[in-house]
């Protein structure tokens, strides 16, 4: 891997053999520490009040004292008791988030379920399920005396597959895992899926759970000075051609212009890599950095400075900072950032013709961004 090498550029959204015009975000939803649904998420962002709270040390005997949890959430409470006995938390969060989105889209969206794709971002699936199942195989009287109904929870695509089965989505089904950039990577993949003609519209998003097992992994992965409280939840949105969205009565919130990703080799190269990534994305989309009015950064050190270096001198965009309000949502982090931009679009920000940026620097050597236009 070479420093600042281009990993991927999704290209101008809506171009290619499967395209029928501009690719737009026409609906979105979230299940977050602010509550369930787009309205709760939007209200939480507007209040700018942190949803991070103290953890019960008996329920969560891990290294973190605070976290952003989806209060009172459980698979049975959110989805009912039928079919949820063995469903783990990240799967339930994903199924609930996709369900909230489908409810906002209306029943007509799945008239041709085989032409609707689903791209879902995740970490490693459920770390808790993987560790619990492995422990049971080691501590039981016999290695094979484990609950077979819980084995599906140990595979990475469990959440995406269960979401499709639960809601009757029969088009392409893809799981994406890419650390903090997972939401952006899922967005880029969804755009390529549509551009290739594999589906007419795509449900796309990311989900992450909080667990003691994940908390310990995150604690050891982070430097001592960089251990923000963890968060959890899911965010999802609908991508479809603008003309089809309008025909279905869904007013586009924003147009996806492009996504772009680069790699860096040394920590000090991360900022310059993101600067070049943003510059390349703006150039590829054929737009001016002077039109950027809204930026939703992940919150990595030096990230905002790197973004400003990619914009014209004197640029003063509005910043939406999700991590201080929600905690570090890991695989769902950039998904929440995208949802924040869509929430702002619903409030009329930025103005028509202006741009929004979603950016991120991952600690494992990648940077990425998405460019959206009103």
Image (cartoon, rainbow, N blue to C red):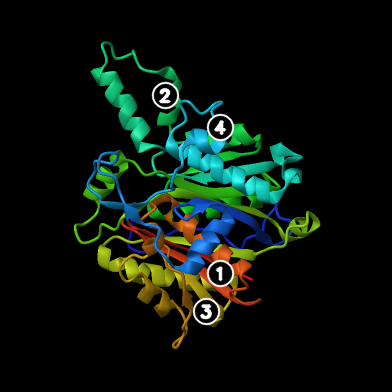
At 74% from the left and 43% from the top, the residue drawn is 107
Q: Quadrant of residue 14?
A: bottom right
- Which badge, 1 or 4, comes first in the chain's sequence? 4
Badge 2: few (under 14), some or many (20 or more) residues near its Cα, within 10 Å? some
- Please name which of the two marks, 2 or 4, marks the residue nearer to the observer: 4
- Please name which of the two marks, 1 or 3, marks the residue nearer to the observer: 3
Q: For mark 3, what is the residue? A: 289
Secondary element at tag 4: loop
Q: Position of residue 135 (x, y in %)?
A: 27, 25
Cα separation between marks 4 and 3:
47 Å
At 34% from the left and 25% from the top, the residue drawn is 133
Secondary element at tag 3: helix
Secondary element at tag 2: helix
Q: Residue furthest top?
A: 142
- Please name which of the two marks, 1 or 2, marks the residue nearer to the observer: 2
Cα separation between marks 3 and 2:
48 Å
Q: For mark 1, what is the residue? A: 284
Q: For mark 2, what is the residue? A: 151
Q: Residue 254 has which mark?
A: none
Badge 4: few (under 14), some or many (20 or more) residues near its Cα, within 10 Å? few
Cα separation between marks 1 and 4:
46 Å
- Left/right placement of residue 156 relative to residue 195 reads left
- Please name which of the two marks, 3 or 2, marks the residue nearer to the observer: 2
Q: Residue furthest right?
A: 247
Q: Position of residue 89 (x, y in %)?
A: 43, 37
Q: Position of residue 189 (x, y in %)?
A: 54, 50
- Which badge, 4 or 3, comes first in the chain's sequence? 4
């Amino acid at each position: 891997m070479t420093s600042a090498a281009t990993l991927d550029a999704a290209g101008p959204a809506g171009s290619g053999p499967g395209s029928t015009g501009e690719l737009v975000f026409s609906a979105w939803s979230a299940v977050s520490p602010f509550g369930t649904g787009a309205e709760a998420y939007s209200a939480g962002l507007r209040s700018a009040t942190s949803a991070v709270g103290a953890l019960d040390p008996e329920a969560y005997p891990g290294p973190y004292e605070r976290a952003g949890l989806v209060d009172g959430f459980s698979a049975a409470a959110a989805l009912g008791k039928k079919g949820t006995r063995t469903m783990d938390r990240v799967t339930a969060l994903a199924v609930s988030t996709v369900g909230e989105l489908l409810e906002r889209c209306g029943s007509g969206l799945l008239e041709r379920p085989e032409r609707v794709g689903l791209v879902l971002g995740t970490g490693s699936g459920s770390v808790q399920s993987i560790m619990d199942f492995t422990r049971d195989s080691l501590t039981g009287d016999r290695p094979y005396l484990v609950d077979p109904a819980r084995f599906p929870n140990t595979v990475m695509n469990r959440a995406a597959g269960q979401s499709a089965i639960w809601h009757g989505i029969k088009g392409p089904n893809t799981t994406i895992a890419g650390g903090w950039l997972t939401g952006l990577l899922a967005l880029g993949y969804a755009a390529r899926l549509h551009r290739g003609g594999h589906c007419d519209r795509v449900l796309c998003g990311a989900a992450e759970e909080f667990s003691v097992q994940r908390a310990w992994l995150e604690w050891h992965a982070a430097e001592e000075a960089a251990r923000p409280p963890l968060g959890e939840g899911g965010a999802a949105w609908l991508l479809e051609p603008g003309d089809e969205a309008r025909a279905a009565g869904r007013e586009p919130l924003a147009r996806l212009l492009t996504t772009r990703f680069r790699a860096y080799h040394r920590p000090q190269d991360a900022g310059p890599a993101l600067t070049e990534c943003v510059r390349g994305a703006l150039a590829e989309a054929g737009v001016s950095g002077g039109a950027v009015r809204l930026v939703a950064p992940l919150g990595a050190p030096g990230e905002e400075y790197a973004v400003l270096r990619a914009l014209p001198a004197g640029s003063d965009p509005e910043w939406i900072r999700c991590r201080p309000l929600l905690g570090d949502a890991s695989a769902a982090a950039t998904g929440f950032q995208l949802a924040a931009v869509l929430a702002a679009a619903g409030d009329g920000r930025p103005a028509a013709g202006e741009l929004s940026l979603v950016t991120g620097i991952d600690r494992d050597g990648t940077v990425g961004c998405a460019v959206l236009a009103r």
